[in-house]
Image (tube, rainbow, N blue to C red):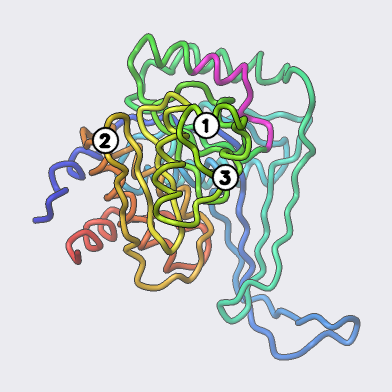
Amino acid sequence: MSKYDSIISKFKNRSVLVIGDLVLDQYIKGTVSRISPEAPVPIVLVQETFYTPGGAANVANNLVSLGAKVTVVGKVGDDIEGQTLKKELTKRGIYTQGVFTDSAIPTILKTRIIAQHQQVVRVDRESALKEGKDSFKISKILPFLRRHIKEFKAIVISDYGKGMVDLSLLNEVHEVARQNKVLVIVDPKVEDLRFYGQVSSITPNKKEAELALKAVSEEARKAFGIVSTKLDTKEHIEANGQGLMKYLGLDSLLITLGEHGMYLFEPNKEPFPIATRAQEVFDVSGAGDTVISVFALSLAAGANRRQAADIANHAAGVVVGKMGAVAIELAELKAAIKKQ
């Protein structure tokens, strides 16, 4: 038995709501044996094509792979890609009642072409962000949240900057979460993290955290003990992370630092460093989705924040050893923790 078995055993059927930008990931895998005569690019002979949930949908996929009961909220276009994404979610046991079809947009599609385990190119299709109120969101998505948000133990907001997460949505989530004492954990995209309000936790990576530090005024930096806008030394990470957490009024701040592991910050506690568990880094895409998924689910299962962050770190060490944004399986997580 591992020290986290009792927590992991409570993952099953924990109700989690995932809100954010839904993406369909397409993988085209093949081989390369020659260069095109038309341009100096490789010719990929296709052997396999498949689809997986991406963006916020990958967060949902990670959660359901660990046994959680997951509902995802977002929108897709009125196109074949939107139908494919909903099928992929349903196939994995993810509830899609909160996925709405908006004929004004295309489904966000990311196509990765891979040859001999090497990504050759990525092609993205998405619509530009709209300014002003989103009438579709107001008429469809917010009413759904009002009806169902009380049913969940935790809410994960997965912001990919594609327009789903805005102030109207955040205000709706905050109001109900406060009334019902529901955890709200955010994977951020905007530089000024005050945009997300006083949520339970935010999980930026190093680049996102440094951009957030830059968004803090010089006066506020001094007031909260932020000594720079960089996370390049242990001293800077600890002082700046602690200051940023206090500035934002969070219950915790979890900063992921790639090959340098993670740092957890909590009020009135010393910064908590967590060394990376990765044996081999093959592909970091989707690692942030895994971290927020496992961190949120562990908290919902009764873990304290340090335990939740450590479990999430083990999970991240598994997925970076795989190609593409791949969900962590429960058996893989248990095996990774037993190895420590």
State the mark number for residue 119: none
Whether residue 168 appears in magenta in the rendering, the answer is yes
Considering depth in this image, is 293 or 255 the residue closer to the camera?
255
Marks 1 and 3: CB-CB under 8 Å? no
Would you call the spot at circle 3 few (<14 residues within 10 Å), some (14-19), or many (20 or more)? Answer: some
Residue 77 at x, y = what percent? 71, 36
Residue positioned 32% across, 63% down in the render = 277
State the mark number for residue 229: 3
Disc 3, SS: loop
How far is disc 1 from disc 2 in space, using C-alphas? 20 Å
User: Label 1 belongs to which residue?
Assistant: 222
Q: Which residues are magenta?
A: 162-173
Marks 2 and 3: CB-CB under 8 Å? no
Considering depth in this image, is 340 or 76 the residue closer to the camera?
340
Quadrant of the rendered image containing residue 36: bottom right
Disc on the earlier residue, 2 or 3: 3
Asked whether residue 71 is in view, the answer is no
Q: Quadrant location of the C terminus?
A: bottom left
Disc on the earlier residue, 1 or 2: 1
Residue 71 to residue 43: above or below: above
- Residue type beneath disc 1: Lys
- Residue type beneath disc 3: Thr
User: Label 2 belongs to which residue?
Assistant: 269
How far is disc 1 from disc 3 in space, using C-alphas? 12 Å
